[in-house]
């Protein structure tokens, strides 16, 4: 007789990456968010909560459609995770959960239901308002909400520093791997985003995402330019900076060379624009384009143009 194998009913306590996120895409793992385990969950009156200073939170508010989804989720499922609050003297300062608090306020106004007058919160008593620690907690609590490149950079950078300072992870490779495991972001993406540290804020805001003119890869290249030249590029050529135009630049260029380059780039762009307005018979289209390219090449050679676009 074959004996039945006893099933292993041992509970798996490992946390699924999905289980660690709430309605807003906020990340919840107490081992990371809280380096001080002395905190308690309490129900706090919404009216007693105070918004944290703007400089602590670099995330954009949820857009209206996502906020409405958050409200509906809270209405049907309840609050999945407590917000995170610092108790400083007699003040309760929100670190993570600003959108949930806003949703509770609106739901109370709409329904007049007293369940929305209070919200569950992890309350940590602090003796000082440590701005750097507050920013780190905000970043760690919002890893998956990072949409803009600047948000991704700030979030990953603070997580990187947290791992180094509080978890003793000295190796960059190990740190990148830990961030990849916790956030689901690719190893190479983490490396590239952290390389953007040398970018000025104005250029950082032009990089990454569908609505920005410069790709992350091109932004990584711009980070090799001196801060002074980055400011010069932004001040003089903000409207001309695109992924394509950046590719022809070099950190070794003088400012006069940069000006000449953008003058040339604009002329070439104008020629191609005019080409599109011409009606060329299909049978000679390819031949005509080659002729245009040859003329441009001759002009480049005659004017000793060094750049290839």
Image (spheres, rainbow, N blue to C red):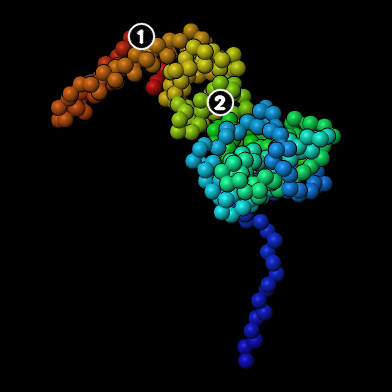
The residue to which callout 1 is attached is 303
At 60% across and 17% down in the image, what residue appears?
A: 227
Label number found at residue 204: 2
Question: Is residue 28 something that shows in the picture?
Answer: no
- Pick the residue in front: 182 or 53: 53
Between residues 124 and 261, which one lies in front from this camera angle? Answer: 124
Pick the quarter of the image with the N terminus: bottom right
Taking the spot 61% from the left edge, 46% from the top edge, the residue there is 112
Task: Pinpoint residue 210: horizontal percent, then vertical percent.
Answer: 45, 33
Label 2 Cα neighbours within 10 Å, binned few <14 / some 14-19 / many ≥20: many
Q: Quadrant of residue 54?
A: top right
Residue closest to the far front? 112
Marking on residue 30: none
State the CA–CA distance, disc 1 to disc 2. Answer: 34 Å
Question: Going by the image, does 208 lie left or right of 299?
Answer: right
Labels 1 and 2: the sequence-earlier one: 2
């Amino acid at each position: 007789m074959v004996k039945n194998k006893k099933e292993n009913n041992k509970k798996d306590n490992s946390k699924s990456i999905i289980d660690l996120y709430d309605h807003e895409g906020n990340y919840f793992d107490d081992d990371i968010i809280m380096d001080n385990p002395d905190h308690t969950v309490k129900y706090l009156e919404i009216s007693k909560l105070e918004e944290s200073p703007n400089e602590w939170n670099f995330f954009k508010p949820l857009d209206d459609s996502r906020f409405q989804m958050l409200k509906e989720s809270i209405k049907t499922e309840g609050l999945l995770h407590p917000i995170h609050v610092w108790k400083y003297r007699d003040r309760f300062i929100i670190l993570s959960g600003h959108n949930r608090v806003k949703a509770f306020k609106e739901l109370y106004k709409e329904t007049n239901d007293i369940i929305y007058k209070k919200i569950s919160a992890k309350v940590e008593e602090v003796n000082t308002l440590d701005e750097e620690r507050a920013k780190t907690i905000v970043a760690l609590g919002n890893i998956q909400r990072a949409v803009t490149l600047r948000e991704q950079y700030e979030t990953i950078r603070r997580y990187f520093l947290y791992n180094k300072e509080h978890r003793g992870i000295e190796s960059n490779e190990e740190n990148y791997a830990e961030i990849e495991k916790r956030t689901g972001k690719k190893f190479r993406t983490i490396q590239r985003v952290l390389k953007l540290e040398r970018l000025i804020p104005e250029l950082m805001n032009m990089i990454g995402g569908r609505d920005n003119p410069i790709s992350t890869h091109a932004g990584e290249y711009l980070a090799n330019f001196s801060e002074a030249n980055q400011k010069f590029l932004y001040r003089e050529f903000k409207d001309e900076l695109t992924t394509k135009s950046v590719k022809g630049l070099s950190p070794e260029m003088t400012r006069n060379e940069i000006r000449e380059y953008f003058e040339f780039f604009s002329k070439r762009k104008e020629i191609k624009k005019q080409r599109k307005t011409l009606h060329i018979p299909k049978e000679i289209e390819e031949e005509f384009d080659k002729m245009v390219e040859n003329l441009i090449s001759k002009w480049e050679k005659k004017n000793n143009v060094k750049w290839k676009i």
